[in-house]
Every structure is written in structure tokens, then in C-alpha cells.
Amino acid sequence: MKRQLTAEQEAARKARKEKFGALWKQVAAMPELERVQLANKLGIVTCEGHELSLCNTMLIALQNPTASIVGGFRQWLKHGRCVRKGEHGLMIWCPTGGGKGEVPPMAIIVYGSNPAPEGDHRFIIGTVFDIGQTEELEARQSEPEEMPVREVNLELCPA
């Protein structure tokens, strides 16, 4: 059973989709040679060392031109880093399983000349963070937290 979103959540969802649509139009409008040259120049990889697709590299470059190593929230935790509070992620295409029908044009761009296997043609908007938006977990845990001091009036305590 799918939970109902509030009006505020629906508005935020719509705004995110519109922003992503505008980014996608920018990537689609670029000549293929320009996309390939920019992707080779940037060389963005995941925190696990995998190269991103040409499409996702372009999307990240438009959102954060200085990005170098990206990963999802949980991926960074596995690598001993955490996303700093207040950081906004970068939107990319993430393939999911279960789609049927024709291969969409974005599947060819994301997977390259060899499109996704039959039945795997759906994409969702995923979020990744650049390494510059993270910090080491150890450094964050070593900072002492201030404990609240509670004063106790001993005169009121029964003897």
C-alpha cells in the first residue's frame, strides 16, 4: 500500500521533476561530440570506482562542475564518510527493473550503444553526493558533544 503524500511533498516532488526535466533538456541539446569530450575531461567516478554513464556525467556536470567522486548516501556511509547536514544531492538517472515495451532514447544514452536488456527499461531520479559534500565519520564522532547540565536542588529531596 502506497502512502499518501502531503500537498507540500507533492509540490516538492513536482519541482524536483521540473528541475530534472530542464537539466535533461540541456544534456539532450548538446551535440554528441561535445558530450563525449566533456565526459572524458571530467572523468567522474563513483566512490566504488565505477565510471558513470555519459548521460549521468553530463547531468552531474551541469549541477556541480567541480564534482569528481560521487556516491549515494548509504554508499558514503559504507566508505566511512557521511554527507554533511544541509547538503543537496545531485540528480541522476538510475535504472530499475520491470519495464516493458520499446527502449526509450535515454536508455541508449545511459547504457551506450548496447541498450538495457529486454524488460529493464525504467529509470527513476536518483540522488548522489560529491565527495566535497561529505566528511569523515571518525572526525565527526570525535567531536565532543556538550551534555546538558541539570541542576538538582538537594533541599527538596527527601532524606
Image: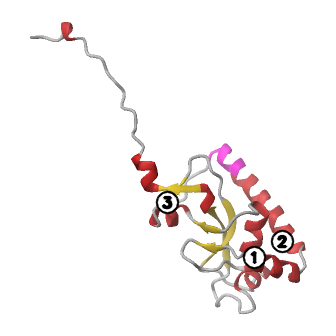
| Badge 2 element | helix
Q: Image point 55% across, 58% down: which residue?
A: 2
Instruction: Calculate the distance from the C-alpha at mark 3 to the C-alpha at mark 1.
Output: 26 Å
Residue closest to the eye, 53 or 123: 53
In the rendered image, which residue does mark 1 sit on?
A: 55
Q: Given the image, on which type of amino acid does mark 3 rest?
A: Arg
For the record, the magenta segment spans: 6-12
- Label 2 neighbour load within 10 Å: few <14, some 14-19, many 20+: many
Task: Identify the mark nearer the N-term, 1 or 2.
Answer: 2
In the displayed structure, does residue 20 sit left or right of residue 32?
left
Tell me where residue 140 appears, x and y as whole percent.
46, 49
Relative to residue 44, is residue 15 depicted above or below? above
| Badge 3 element | strand
In the rendered image, which residue does mark 3 sit on?
A: 81
| Badge 1 element | helix
Residue closest to the eye, 112 or 103: 112
In the rendered image, which residue does mark 2 sit on?
A: 27
Residue closest to the eye, 67 or 2: 67
Task: Identify the mark nearer the N-term, 3 or 1.
Answer: 1
Task: Identify the mark nearer the N-term, 3 or 2.
Answer: 2
| Labels 1 and 2 touching (C-beta < 8 A) | yes
Q: Image point 70% across, 76% down: which residue?
A: 43
User: Which numbered mark, 3 or 2, is in the foreground of this view?
Assistant: 3
Magenta span: chief secondary structure: helix
